[in-house]
Image (cartoon, helix red, strand yellow):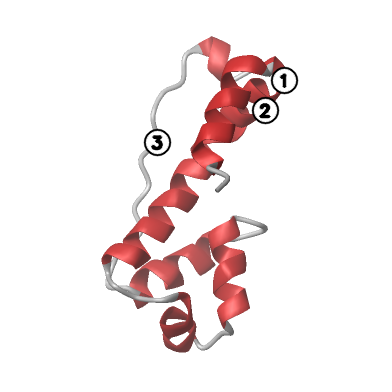
């Protein structure tokens, strides 16, 4: 069986370009992961969440993929599971905000 985590770790260790691109997107991956974990921890399937949102299951999958998802959509997603969406702005050192 192929283990995606092992493949990712190997690529992070051996492929500088992969590592660089992943690091750039790491914050985006983190919030996507948080959405999915919240749904799973709430015991809600994508199909059940789709019904609550009034959308199709593939639409929920698209939200969870992070493709072109707006703040309003993420807010609705969170609310449908009993969560609220908050933002935390943090100062970034100059080398990170270039």
Vertical placement of 6 versus 63: above or below?
above
Residue 9 visible in this rendered orientation of the protein: yes
Residue at 34%, 65% (x, y): give it: 40
- Residue to which mark 2 is pinned: 21
Q: Residues within 10 Å of mark 2 (few under 14, many from 20)?
A: few
- Residue to which mark 1 is pinned: 17
Q: Nearer the viewer, residue 92 or 15?
A: 15
Q: Nearer the viewer, mark 3 or mark 1?
A: 1
Residue at 35%, 72% (x, y): give it: 79
Q: Position of residue 93 (x, y in %)?
A: 47, 13
Q: Does dot 1 land on a helix, a strand or a loop?
A: helix
Residue 84 visible in this rendered orientation of the protein: no
The reply to whether callout 1 and callout 2 are in contact (CB within 8 Å) is: yes
Q: Nearer the viewer, residue 91 or 52?
A: 52
- Residue to which mark 3 is pinned: 89
Place residue 61 in its image quadrant.
bottom right
CA separation, marks 3 and 1? 28 Å
Q: Does dot 2 land on a helix, a strand or a loop?
A: helix
CA separation, marks 3 and 2? 22 Å
Q: Position of residue 45 (x, y in %)?
A: 41, 76
Place residue 10 in its image quadrant.
top right
Q: Nearer the viewer, mark 3 or mark 2?
A: 2
Q: Earlier in the sequence, mark 3 or mark 2?
A: 2
């Amino acid at each position: 069986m192929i283990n995606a985590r092992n493949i990712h770790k190997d690529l992070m260790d051996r492929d500088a370009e992969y590592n660089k691109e992943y690091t750039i997107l790491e914050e985006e991956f983190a919030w996507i992961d948080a959405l999915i974990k919240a749904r799973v921890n709430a015991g809600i399937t994508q199909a059940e969440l789709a019904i609550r949102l009034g959308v199709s299951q593939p639409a929920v999958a698209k939200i969870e993929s992070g493709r072109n998802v707006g703040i309003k959509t993420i807010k609705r997603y969170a609310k449908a599971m009993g969560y609220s969406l908050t933002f935390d702005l943090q100062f970034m050192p100059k080398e990170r905000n270039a």
